[in-house]
């Protein structure tokens, strides 16, 4: 057995006509060998499916039958479209190294490399993506193959850069689609290996970074050609920026991002400069609801090419600026002053004014109010006998002068002890960052001091009114 040959097929002749020459590599569920067609003397690729060793004989037979059926589908698809890797034959053999049954498919040998390898090399060179016309030209042949498969009722379900191959052909470099059939088998098969394994349910085989929302959560919708549309849009964005769109460390993190209704991966949200029409088409292709996406790859690609033409004729420059229809980001929790506050100086009191908008007011955490508490000292004095019937100022929260009562007999609050409704904000020295606990402590301290000062002032006012009432009483 040759080194690094997990199945031990090197040197074997499959079905009397396919000689296995060398081991190429393996993925999660398959091993790939390079061979030669004995009769045609042409290079071939042999892809072997690795079945879990715990499968029972009955389930193995069912699996092999499905594998053969899907191999026939792959064969028919490759006969109808040149951009699908050509299927030549399929069968089963016994692995010399493991004595396990190994289903295999014989495919045409492709010279070149996968799109995943090409993108990885571009990232190592710190390249910053292709233009949209270049991306469309690169992916065009593969989308044509996928559209043909959709027209025949076949869904790939595992479209990612690793399953797209940049093959050298007489017509130049063409992107071909790989792995039809295998992904479909593993997507529909329930591997009930034991009583505990039944809880796992259906095994779905797909790259999580390119999975559509319905592949993570069946309640989102059924899997169909629109599932491939979602993956195509992600691959397109990756080609545009030379970086993967969905990044994570485990499948749960990918699922959360795919199912996040508020943060959708549109081109402009990722910093890619595109026109308005292209932004709309790719945003629709990446919609959470499968019903909102284009129905198949052909429809998506036609819409994208049309949008590219419309944007080009519009004369508007492509950009990555947040669209005006999207709400602006919320303001920061702390408003900082431009000038540094000298050491030992009193903390300045500032009032932050924002341009009024038609949208409902939204609290940002800068003011804390207790239910039922008066809004100002004037509102508190409205409950005293002398101030009853006196209207409050039109807008007490925005009064810039110390608040005064309309009654001349009420003593005025000294300006030094007045409680401002604005928020005191201290600008720290450069390089020093005020933490949230410190800011919270400052706010609470101001609230407590304000409440004490307001209460003392209210008691003094009431005592003054009581003294005046006693002086004017006929019983004195």
Image (tube, rainbow, N blue to C red):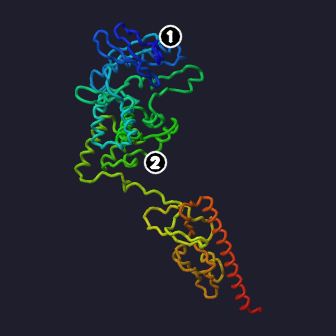
Mark 2 touches mark 1? (CB < 8 Å): no
Vertical order, 145 against 131 (above or below): above
Residue 84 figure quarter: top left
| Image location of residue 103, percent across then percent down | 43, 15
Q: Which mark is first along the chain, 1 or 2? A: 1
| Image location of residue 391, percent across then percent down | 56, 79
| In the foreground, 393 or 25 | 25
| Image location of residue 273, percent across then percent down | 33, 49
| Image location of residue 117, percent across then percent down | 38, 32
Q: Regarding mark 1 in the picture, which secondary structure is present there?
A: loop
Which mark is nearer the camera, 2 or 1?
A: 1
At 67% across and 82% down in the image, what residue appears? 461
Vertical order, 266 against 347 (above or below): above
At 28% across and 21% down in the image, what residue appears? 79
Extreme-right residue of the structure: 476
- Number of numbered discs on residues: 2
Vertical order, 69 against 121 (above or below): above
Residue 112 circle label: none
Extreme-top residue of the structure: 16
Q: Regarding mark 2 in the picture, which secondary structure is present there?
A: loop
Vertical order, 143 against 316 (above or below): above
Q: Mark 1: give few (<14), some (14-19) or many (20+) Cα within 10 Å.
A: few
| In the foreground, 139 or 339 | 339
For the residues labelled 2 and 1, the Cα–Cα distance comes to 51 Å
User: What residue would you read off at disc 1?
Assistant: 99
Residue 262 circle label: 2
Asked whether, in this view, residue 210 is left or right of residue 109, the answer is right
Q: Mark 2: give few (<14), some (14-19) or many (20+) Cα within 10 Å.
A: few
Residue 161 figure quarter: top left
């Amino acid at each position: 057995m040759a080194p690094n040959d997990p199945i031990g097929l090197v040197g074997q002749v499959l079905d009397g006509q396919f000689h296995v020459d060398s081991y190429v590599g393996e993925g999660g569920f398959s091993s790939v060998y390079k061979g030669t067609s004995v009769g045609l003397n042409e290079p071939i690729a042999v892809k072997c499916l690795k079945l879990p060793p715990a499968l029972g004989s009955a389930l193995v037979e069912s699996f092999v039958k499905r594998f053969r059926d899907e191999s026939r589908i792959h064969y028919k698809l490759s006969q109808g479209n040149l951009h699908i890797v050509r299927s030549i034959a399929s069968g089963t053999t016994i692995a010399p190294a493991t004595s396990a049954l190994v289903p295999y498919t014989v495919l045409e040998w492709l010279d070149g490399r996968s799109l995943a390898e090409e993108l990885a090399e571009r990232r190592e060179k710190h390249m910053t993506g292709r233009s949209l016309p270049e991306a469309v030209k690169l992916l065009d042949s593969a989308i044509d193959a996928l559209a043909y498969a959709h027209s025949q009722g076949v869904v790939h379900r595992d479209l990612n850069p690793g399953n797209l191959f940049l093959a050298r052909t007489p017509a130049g470099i063409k992107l071909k689609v790989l792995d039809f059939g295998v992904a479909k088998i593993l997507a529909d098969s329930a591997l009930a290996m034991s009583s505990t394994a039944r809880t796992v349910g259906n095994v779905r085989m797909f790259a999580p970074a390119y999975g559509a929302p319905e592949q993570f959560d069946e309640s989102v919708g059924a899997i169909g050609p629109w599932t491939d549309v979602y993956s195509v849009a992600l691959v397109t964005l990756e080609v545009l920026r030379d970086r993967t769109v969905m990044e994570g460390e485990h499948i749960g993190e990918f699922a959360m991002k795919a199912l996040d209704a508020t943060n959708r991966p549109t081109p402009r949200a990722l910093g890619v400069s595109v026109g308005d029409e292209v932004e709309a088409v790719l945003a629709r292709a990446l919609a959470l609801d499968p019903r909102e996406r284009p129905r198949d790859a052909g429809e998506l690609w036609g819409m994208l090419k049309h949008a590219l033409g419309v944007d080009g004729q519009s004369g508007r420059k492509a950009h990555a600026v947040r669209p005006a229809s999207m709400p602006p980001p919320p303001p920061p929790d702390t408003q900082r002053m431009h000038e540094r506050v000298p050491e030992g100086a009193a903390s300045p009191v500032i009032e932050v004014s924002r341009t009024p908008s038609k949208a409902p007011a939204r609290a940002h955490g800068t003011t804390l109010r207790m239910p039922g508490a008066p809004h100002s000292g004037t509102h508190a004095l409205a409950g005293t006998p002398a101030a009853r019937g006196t209207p409050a100022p039109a807008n007490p929260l925005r009064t810039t002068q110390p608040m005064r009562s309309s009654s001349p007999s009420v003593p005025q609050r000294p300006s030094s002890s007045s409680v401002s409704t604005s928020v005191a904000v201290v600008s720290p020295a450069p390089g020093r960052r005020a933490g949230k606990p410190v800011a919270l402590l400052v706010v609470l301290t101001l609230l407590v001091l304000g409440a004490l000062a307001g209460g003392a002032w209210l008691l003094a006012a009431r005592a003054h009114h009581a003294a005046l009432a006693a002086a004017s009483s006929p019983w004195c």
